[in-house]
């Protein structure tokens, strides 16, 4: 949708400014414009898609759940309460949606130069057809226009899914998820287009608060009583089978470290026993999480689920905020991450296994050329995930391409598969990635390092064919 007056988006946004390279980039970008979106690493809730109800209001859709946006405003002194982020001790007591939107619109200048600005502009103009930038003066009018749009049937989740050109989207689901929403969607013909992803973090980090409750739920959902380590492994294997049957293509693992050092069964049993008693040490828990990554690779080599690893983020840096408001409110901070030694046990055991695909992500970009590209450039099992979280920015994605292509080539990547809870930003994120790739490839053409037809084919590969290949998405989709 294009706005009728006032506010428009420049057709060359995020393309190179060089007058020789830009026309080439335009031609490459045009060759990807109509390709479907393959979104294999998303965090949109399956329930939202299964219910397919109108979104409640502009603030709860576009502001409150967006931790990129929230963290910027909080950094400038805006309280979480003003952004609609609830407190555990006062559930339901939050600012009214219109007030949340006014706060966001008033602070619009804070997002200059950020990817949040790029994504939100795309959403507001291209998806909702707004004709004026957010501001204190325009806030109420824009809120009313957005509310009017959201009441229409063609702005419901599944209608937008089709309008966005999404061919397949993977949600992220706990190992204990019932997958009822996916079953509902499958019953209505969406089963091949909206698939689950197995995320077992809650039961792999044994010193996490609530771990024993999650293990009890895992036992209930798997039908396997869990009295020790081997029971835990069998329960996870059973749940993976359920996910595979529901159409899952991948697993997803968020660990502080990339360590994959295996333990003996006896040591693993000892740690799980201590965790079940409630007296496991932090060191033992960390060792166990590394061991379980090794085990997850073993299981993926057996059942074929692509293994995605997202290490290197210290979650909930402000523990008081986490206790008061929960996770995902902006306080997850990157840490230095080591891959070469950490992944060696896993890769020596499974790096050449024909049935394993290990997708590596990072928020420590110093590792791009030193560690990740060389690993992907030699182990058949390894692929490089798209720049993630703090790096899925125009400049971050350019640096990624420049750092890894020399060593890994394009074929050892996954293409852009996004990483967002913000449903309406999915096309914006893919559009930005395609523009960055078009610019990078155009430079290679201008430097006579690629022919134009090769650059166009590569851009199409990165946008569509490589993601499907990396995640073994059936060709019929």
Image (cartoon, rainbow, N blue to C red):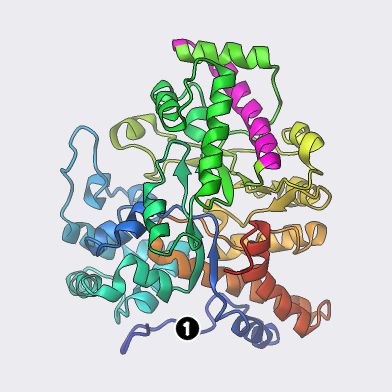
Q: Quadrant of residue 153?
A: bottom left
Reply above or below: 356 against 402: above
Q: Nearer the viewer, residue 301 or 213?
A: 301
| Mark 1, residue position | 10
Q: Nearer the viewer, residue 134 or 164?
A: 164
Q: Position of residue 326 (x, y in %)?
A: 34, 37
Residue at 73%, 36% in the rendered image: 343
Q: Position of residue 269 (x, y in %)?
A: 60, 14
Q: Quadrant of the C terminus?
A: bottom right
Q: Position of residue 92 (x, y in %)?
A: 17, 43
For the stretch drawn in magenta, the main secondary structure is helix
Q: Position of residue 169 (x, y in %)?
A: 49, 60
Which residues lie in the magenta part?
A: 277-302
**Residue 141 in sight in this render:** yes
142 horizontally vs 405: left or right? left
Residue at 57%, 44% in the rendered image: 251
Q: Secondary structure at mark 1?
A: loop
Figure label count: 1
Q: Nearer the viewer, residue 107 or 391?
A: 391
Query: Is residue 309 covered in magenta?
Result: no
Query: Is residue 290 covered in magenta?
Result: yes
Reply above or below: 413 against 2: above
Q: Quadrant of residue 277?
A: top left
Residue at 66%, 31% in the rendered image: 295
**Residue 114 in sight in this render:** no
Reply above or below: 291 against 273: below
């Amino acid at each position: 949708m294009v706005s009728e007056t006032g506010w428009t988006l420049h057709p060359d946004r995020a393309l190179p400014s060089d007058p020789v390279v830009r026309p080439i980039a335009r031609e490459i970008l045009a060759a990807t414009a109509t390709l479907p979106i393959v979104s294999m690493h998303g965090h949109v809730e399956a329930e939202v898609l299964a219910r397919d109800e109108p979104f409640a209001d502009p603030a709860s859709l576009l502001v409150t759940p967006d931790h990129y946006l929230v963290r910027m405003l909080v950094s400038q002194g805006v309280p979480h309460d003003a952004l609609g982020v609830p407190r555990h001790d006062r559930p339901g007591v939050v600012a009214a949606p219109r007030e949340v939107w006014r706060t966001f619109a008033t602070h619009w200048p804070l997002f200059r130069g950020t990817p949040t600005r790029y994504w939100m502009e795309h959403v507001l103009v291209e998806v909702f057809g707004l004709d004026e930038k957010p501001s204190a003066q325009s806030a109420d009018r824009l809120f009313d226009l957005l509310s009017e749009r959201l009441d229409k049937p063609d702005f419901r989740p599944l209608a937008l899914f089709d309008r966005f050109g999404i061919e397949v989207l993977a949600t992220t689901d706990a190992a204990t998820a019932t997958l009822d929403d996916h079953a509902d969607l499958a019953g209505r013909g969406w089963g091949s287009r909206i698939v689950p992803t197995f995320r077992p973090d809650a039961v792999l980090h044994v010193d996490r608060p609530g771990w024993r409750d999650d293990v009890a739920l895992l036992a209930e959902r798997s039908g396997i009583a869990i009295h020790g380590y081997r029971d835990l492994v069998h329960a996870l294997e059973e749940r993976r089978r359920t996910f595979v049957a529901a159409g899952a293509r991948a697993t997803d693992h968020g660990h502080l470290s990339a360590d994959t050092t295996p333990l003996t069964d006896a040591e693993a049993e000892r740690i799980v026993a201590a965790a079940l008693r409630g007296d496991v040490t932090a060191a033992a828990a960390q060792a166990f999480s590394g061991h379980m990554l090794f085990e997850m690779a073993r299981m993926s080599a057996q059942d074929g689920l692509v293994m995605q690893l997202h290490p290197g983020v210290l979650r909930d840096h402000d523990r008081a905020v986490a206790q008061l408001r929960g996770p995902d409110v902006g306080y997850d901070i990157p840490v230095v991450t080591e891959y070469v030694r950490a992944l060696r046990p896993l890769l020596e055991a499974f790096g050449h296994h024909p049935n394993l695909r290990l997708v590596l992500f990072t928020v420590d970009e110093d590792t791009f050329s030193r560690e990740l590209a060389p690993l992907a450039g030699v182990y058949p099992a390894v692929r490089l995930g798209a720049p993630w979280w703090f790096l899925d920015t125009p400049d971050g994605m350019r640096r990624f391409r420049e750092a890894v292509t020399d060593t890994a080539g394009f074929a050892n990547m996954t293409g852009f598969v996004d990483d967002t809870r913000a449903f309406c930003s999915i096309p914006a994120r893919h559009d930005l990635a395609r523009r960055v790739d078009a610019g990078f490839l155009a430079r290679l053409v201008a430097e006579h390092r690629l022919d134009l037809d090769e650059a166009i084919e590569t851009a199409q590969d990165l946008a569509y064919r490589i993601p499907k290949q990396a995640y073994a998405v059936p060709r019929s989709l």
